[in-house]
Amino acid sequence: MANGFKVFGVGEVLTAADVNDYLMEQSLCIFENATARDAQITSPIEGQFCYLKDSNVLQVYNGSWSNFIDEGDITAVNTAGTSGLSGGATSGAANLVIAPNSATSATVASADIVLIGDADDSNAVKKTTVADIVALAPSGVSLGLVLALS
C-alpha cells in the first residue's frame, strides 16, 4: 500500500505494485454507481476518492465511503442580541422574522435609511432615505411620518 508520492528515476522498472499503489489507489476513479465501485475497489484505502455518476457525488474513503462535499445545510441562524429579529433554523429553510415592536426606538434623521417593498417591482426590497420621503410632500406642507408595521 502506497503512502504519498513517488518520484520514478530514469531507467527504473515500473512494477505492478507501483502501478497499483501510486497510480490506481491515488487516482480519482469514476464509476456509474456505488455497486460498480464496490465491485472494482475491493480493498479501499483511507483517503481514496471516487466519483459516482448516478448521484453526481464525490466520495472519500475514511473507513467507509462518504460524500466528500454534501449538499449544504444550515447549522444555525442566531438572532440572539439583535434588535427586533427572531426566528432561525438548524436545518432546511430558515425563517427570519422582523418584529418591529421588539426593536429599540430611534430619533429619525434625514439621512436614515428606510427599507420598502417596491409594489411596482415584484415587491423587491429597496431603500430610500427619510429626506427622500419628506421631499415627496408638496411645498409648504408639514409632513408627519407614521409607519405601521406588524
Image (cartoon, grey):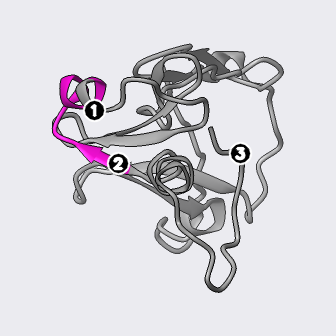
**In the displayed structure, does residue 47 sit left or right of residue 92?**
right
Q: Residue at x 58, y 45 (%)?
A: 145
Give me the residue at 35% from left, 31% from top.
41
Q: Which quadrant holds the N terminus?
A: top right
In reply to whether residue 31 is colored magenta, the answer given is yes
Residue position for label 1: 40
Q: Amino acid at mark 3?
A: Asn
Asked if the stretch drawn in magenta spans residue 113, the answer is no
Residue that numbered label 2 is attached to: 29
Residue 141 in view (yes/no): no
Estimate the spatial distance between the alpha carbons at disc 1 and disc 3, rounded to whole Å: 21 Å
Say above or below: 63 vs 19: above
Chain-order first, disc 1 or disc 3: 3
Left or right for 18, reference 81: left
> In terms of sequence position, does the residue under pointer 2 or pointer 1 come before the other?
2
Residue type beneath disc 1: Gln
Secondary structure category for the residue under label 2: strand
Give the Cα separation between the discs numbered 3 and 2.
18 Å
Earlier-in-chain disc, 3 versus 2 = 3
Q: Nearer the viewer, mark 2 or mark 1?
A: 1
In this picture, which residue range is highlighted in magenta? 29-38
Task: Mark 3 vs mark 2: give the one in front.
Answer: 3
Tag of residue 3: 3
Q: Name the secondary structure under disc 1.
A: helix
- Where's residue 129, x and y in %? 62, 63
User: Badge 1: few (under 14), some or many (20 or more) residues near its Cα, within 10 Å?
Assistant: few
How far across and down, in percent of the image, does residue 60 sit? 50, 34
